[in-house]
Image: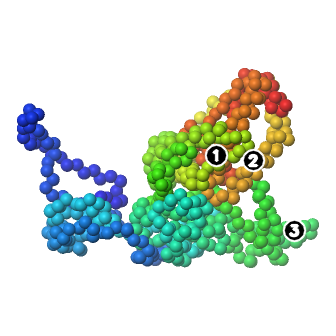
Amino acid sequence: IILGASEMPCRLDANPRCLGTNWELGHEVWHHSSRVGAFEVYLLTPPLAPKDLNEAEVSLPSAAFTSGHDIGAGVSSNERHDSIGALGPTLGRGKTWGATRLLPCGYTATLLHSKLSANSWPGKGQLGRRLFAAMPLGSVSVHVVCPSGDPLPNFNLEVLAPAGPALTAPQALQSDAANSQSDATCIATGSCWAGICHVRGVPIGTALGLRVVHPTMSSRAVRFVTSRLRASVSFGTDIVYRLWQCEVPGGLLIYASDEAAGSGKVPEGARPMIGEVETASGEKLQVQGRVRLPWWTFCSDREGVLGMPLTTESGQITVVGCECSASVSLELPSSRQLKNWLPDAVASPQDILSHSRCKELLKDFDEILIALQLRGAEQEAMQPLILPPFELMVLERIVDNCCYFVEAYRNAALERWQRVGRDDQDVGPYMEVVQDVKQELGYSQVCELCTRVAQSSSVMQARRELDRCVRNTLTLHSRGARLALAYLAAARAKPLLEELCARIATATKSRLVCGMLKGSDGSTRAFERTILGAESGPPRDLARCRLVCSSMSHVRETLVGVLE
């Protein structure tokens, strides 16, 4: 059993030997492996990271977590007698398991079972209990970064112990859906500095919660299960700046300053601004001397952690009838790990994802989108598509996992290939087609009609309603929650859109092409746009139809039909 190594093959080579002649079968019986006379099972653990006096630490109390196993159960008295075949002169000598030795390479070897010493095979579940007991305590590194790229100078960290190792449907709703920790108990706290803090003494496989608190940011909380001895999670602060107003002839002059800027840099006579400002997205914010905005484009990175496990009475996790247990419990790679997966040639994120150990994400998400489209087509007129709360929470986690993978791909690709996207030579043929279209007769008239359609009252009303829906999703901090709700709305609107386009196609004799929801073909474009355009909300083209025309004049007739 190896920790810290990706693979260590062990092969038992033996020459085949004859065990005798079976007179009923009428031939000799040959055995292709030798008898195992004695063996020993060791746990090899890598050295933990050394402590840094310049970095803050929070140590968990030893009684915070219990294994839930009776380590001594199933161990006979014969096993506990002094043994010569253990590890020689090491700590713990005199038992058939538990002896340790520090190897020259830095790893620590811990004996889990010795057949020669115990003169018996390990009992049922015995190795698992001993492995759990011998596993060393790990650490979780917490990083907090400001939008400027600098670490947060100081913050408070709370370590939370969830109510149980697994979340049932009701528990998951109370905790993960709103990202709250009301069902958790605070077991350790600490003041941290330099943007990093290490939580020491964390058993592997432990359900844990972390909450970062700072006066200039909303409380950040995350729940996970440690899967490695050395794990790490990162948080991003809010975008915070101060506004000052200064009276000048003809009105007010508004200054903006960094939160940490001293009073000496503020103009004389300026006072904190109190009023209302409007963001680029149209959202109005009340200002009391300070503006706080979510950092939507923050690149979260985590390593060695799993999402909180989910359980149901049936043992299966489904969304609209699609089984997706594997996608919920995946350990997602960090940007550093994903960089090693990338080939030498530039590849798209869906190619990397579909050929990685996380390929179940796209497969399950594709099945869910198809089922959502069928469910949306069965809805009665003007009835919204609503999922049960637990299924919605599972869908949000799957979508969030997809967004996280694409985000990790983008960061790894920028580091590996120094770019993300197409080469100029890839878009060359496309630009040639665009130039040819512009030379066709009637192109300018089509452009004018497109402008009239975009400025028509019905289109403007639909755009305002769409913007209102998008602004409502921006109140949700999780990208998975925002995009999942957008997909539910798109699945419900898709049959209505197809009905409208079918009427236009019949009236204008154009060909209607109705595609699936965006992402149903394994594409990751919706996740990419969610990440890159986080401040503007989810993509607006999740449901789409296409009217195919035979000529530029046919395009003009179709646009006139749309206006009418």
Q: What element carries label 1?
A: helix
Q: Residue at x 53, y 70 (%)?
A: 184
Residue for point 52% across, 48% down: 318
Numbered tag placed on residue 252 in the rendering? 3
- Which residue was labeled with disc 2? 466
Displayed quadrant of residue 431? top right
Q: From what the image shows, is residue 442 above or below residue 456?
A: above
Q: Of helix, strand and loop, which one carries label 3?
A: strand
Is 290 above or below relative to 314?
below
Q: Give the Cα distance between marks 2 and 3.
A: 34 Å
Task: Tell me whether the residue at label 2 lies in contact with that at label 3, contact meaning CB atoms closer than 8 angstroms.
Answer: no
> Which residue occupies the foreground of this view, 51 or 75?
75
Residue type marked 3: Leu
- Label 2 with label 1: CB-CB less than 8 Å: no
Q: How far is mark 3 from mark 1, CA to CA?
A: 44 Å
Q: What type is the residue that disc 2 sits on?
A: Leu
16 displayed left or right of 366? left
Q: Which of 358 and 501 is in front in this view?
A: 501
Q: Residue at x 42, y 69 (%)?
A: 202
Query: On the image, numbered disc 1 is attached to which residue?
Result: 487
Q: Which image quadrant: the N terminus?
A: bottom left
Give percent across and percent down for residue 256.
76, 67
